[in-house]
Amino acid sequence: MAAPQLFFIGLGNMGRGMVKNLVEKGKLDKPILLHNRTKQVAVDLGNKLGAGKTQVVDSIAEGVAQADIIFCILSSDKVVEATINTILESDVTGKLVIECSTIHPDTTERIGELVLAAGGEFVASPVFGAPNMADAGGLIGVLCGPASSVEKAKPYYTGVMARTIIDLSDQPYRKAPTLKLIGNTFMLGMIEQLAEAHVLAETSGLGTENLHKFIENMLPGPYASYSTRMLSGDYHKREYPLFAVDLARKDAGHAMALAQAAGTRLPMIEVADAHLVKVKEIRGELGDIAAIYGAVRVEAGLKFENE
């Protein structure tokens, strides 16, 4: 039996890392089809990965016609819905769509039902991790949908794109993005907490380096990594954001809407989102989620930049 033909739509920071690991560890016998809104991004990735490993297609329709499994990881609900509608202009009978974007649960339910109604299969699969984790194959994949469809997706996760999965087989599609959005509040809350703590360390006279030593020893991993990004000035020196302010606000907005619908609140996320608004005012689209540190600094009467 021939191996499935993979088609990957969306080559942002996360998508490029995922494709890299599919090529290097996926045991594929066909080039991965690639499509990105900016074609040159796909061309550059293909050149980086080597001849014969990928094939850039000019349109989504061209890719869908050849594909058995279609991965999507895109920036917003609006873009995801438009892309799914374009996919469904072609015959998707028997094809599996694996949707990896961070979107609202209502959006996931809606597009999942559309794919099923068109004769395709659908797995909701948001992923946890930063771009460097995607590049290293260290993501955590959430797989939600009919068990038979999830089984088709699994070979491309643990040991390939991901270090492990959270299996939500046979559960409603909306549970995957709900988990993803709640999970992302941990990251946003962590960044808010770090920003506030470092500003207090500076203004109280303790010193940020002393606090950083505590973080490195007590909270290694993401806490230490983001602490380093703040203290090194990476949050304002980057040419391009690692996690853009608009995407962070989209995730925060979805999480707060979920909380409101459930009759509760996320006060820490409300505070963090207000700081993201300030980041956008100061840095525009170049604003990074870690620049919450700069916004908290400004509130305390310090310069946005820590230099």
Image (cartoon, rainbow, N blue to C red):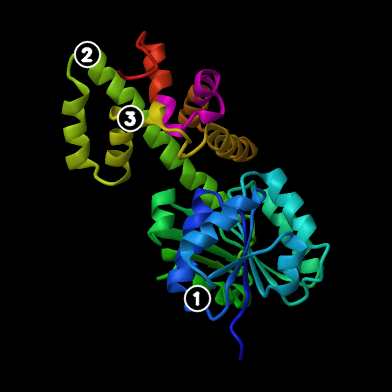
Q: Secondary structure at mark 3?
A: helix
Q: Residue at x 62, y 47 (%)?
A: 103
Please state the horizontal and vertical placement of residue 230, each as a whole percent of the image.
33, 30
The answer to if 288 sits in the magenta stretch is: yes
| Of callouts 1 and 2, the N-terminal one | 1
Q: Residue at x 56, y 33 (%)?
A: 249
- Placement of 217 over or under 169, stated as above or below: above
Tell me the tag on residue 204.
2
Mark 1–mark 2 Cα distance, whole angstroms, equals: 52 Å
- Placement of 284 over or under 242, stated as above or below: above
Q: Residue at x 28, y 35 (%)?
A: 228
Tell me the tag on residue 280.
none
Residue at image mark 3: 230
Quarter of image, res 5:
bottom right
Q: Quadrant of the N terminus?
A: bottom right
Q: Secondary structure at mark 1?
A: helix
Query: Is label 2 or label 3 in front?
Result: 3
For the record, the magenta segment spans 276-292
| Of callouts 1 and 3, the N-terminal one | 1
Please state the horizontal and vertical placement of residue 106, each as a whole percent of the image.
70, 49
What amino acid type is highlighted by mark number 2?
Answer: Ser
Tell me the tag on residue 155.
1
Mark 2–mark 3 Cα distance, whole angstroms, equals: 18 Å
